[in-house]
């Protein structure tokens, strides 16, 4: 039941996004925009949007749009166009198609890939022992307990170096 109401709310919000997007794009691209109309649309977005990011962008843009409606200053008009651009970017992010599985968990890293991340090494590059040792020394400078690092982090660094130098000796965990 709760899933259906969430889906219904998302559908309603998506139905409103397209008209808002078209109206704001039209106003932003106009030679002399009707800033009062833009302010009304953005105020509606700030009041009724279900997305917190879009509401925040609209609330932040509203003062500049109201100032542009009351003022013929070119600098204020440029700032208002920028604010409309920010709001349009948020709307675009909400309406852009998403590819892949949304709720999929990230792929689990192998022990070698985790070791490369710990040492700050690239994942898909062939490494020599010297490359691994240089990365270890670089990382160890800041992680050593005598330099203010923790003993556990330093031991993790040493374990990562061992995994990379002797890759067959360690199992994936």
Image (tube, grey):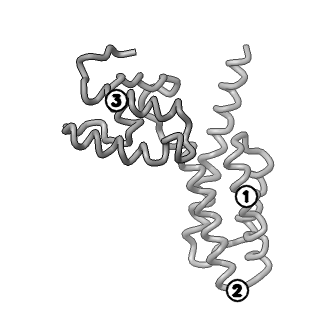
Question: Looking at the image, which residue is at 69% across and 55% down?
Answer: 57
Q: Is residue 86 left or right of residue 111?
A: right
Q: What element does badge 1 sit on?
A: helix
Question: Looking at the image, which residue is at 38% across and 39% down?
Answer: 119
| Camera-nearest label, 1 or 3 | 3
Establish if 88 lies above or below 31: above
Q: Quadrant of the N terminus?
A: top right
Q: Callout 1 environment at 10 Å: few (<14), some (14 to 19), or many (20+)?
A: many
Query: Alpha carbon of mark 1 to alpha carbon of mark 3: how far?
Result: 46 Å
Name the spot of residue 166 as percent of width and height, x first.
Answer: 24, 24
Query: Alpha carbon of mark 2 to alpha carbon of mark 1: how far?
Result: 20 Å
Question: Looking at the image, which residue is at 19% across and 39% down?
Answer: 128
Q: What element does badge 2 sit on?
A: loop
Cβ–Cβ below 8 Å for labels 2 and 1?
no
Give residue 73's mark: 2
Q: Callout 3 environment at 10 Å: few (<14), some (14 to 19), or many (20+)?
A: some
Name the spot of residue 112 as percent of width and height, x first.
Answer: 32, 26
The disc, 2 or 1, on the residue closer to the chain's N-terminal end is 1
In front of the other: 9 or 120: 120
Query: Alpha carbon of mark 3 to alpha carbon of mark 2: how far?
Result: 56 Å
From the image, tell me which residue sits under label 1.
42
Name the spot of residue 157 as percent of width and height, x first.
Answer: 42, 34
From the image, tell me which residue sits under label 3.
113
Work out which residue is located at the far bottom of the displayed protein and give it.
73
Cβ–Cβ below 8 Å for labels 1 and 3?
no
Q: What element does badge 3 sit on?
A: helix
């Amino acid at each position: 039941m709760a899933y259906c109401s969430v889906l219904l709310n998302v559908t309603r919000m998506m139905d409103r996004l397209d008209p808002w997007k078209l109206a704001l794009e039209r106003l932003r691209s106009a030679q002399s925009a009707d800033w009062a109309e833009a302010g009304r649309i953005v105020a509606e977005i700030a009041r009724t949007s279900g997305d917190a990011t879009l509401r925040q962008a609209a609330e932040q843009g509203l003062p500049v749009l109201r100032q542009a409606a009351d003022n013929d200053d070119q600098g204020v008009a440029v700032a208002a166009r920028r604010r409309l651009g920010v709001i349009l970017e948020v709307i675009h992010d909400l309406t852009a198609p998403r590819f892949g599985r949304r709720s999929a968990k990230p792929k689990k890293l192998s022990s070698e890939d985790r070791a490369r991340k710990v040492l700050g090494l690239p994942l898909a590059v062939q490494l020599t022992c010297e490359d691994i040792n240089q990365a270890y020394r670089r990382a160890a400078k800041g992680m050593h307990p005598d330099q203010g690092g923790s003993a556990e982090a330093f031991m993790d660094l040493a374990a990562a170096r061992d995994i990379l130098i002797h890759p067959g000796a360690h199992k994936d965990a």
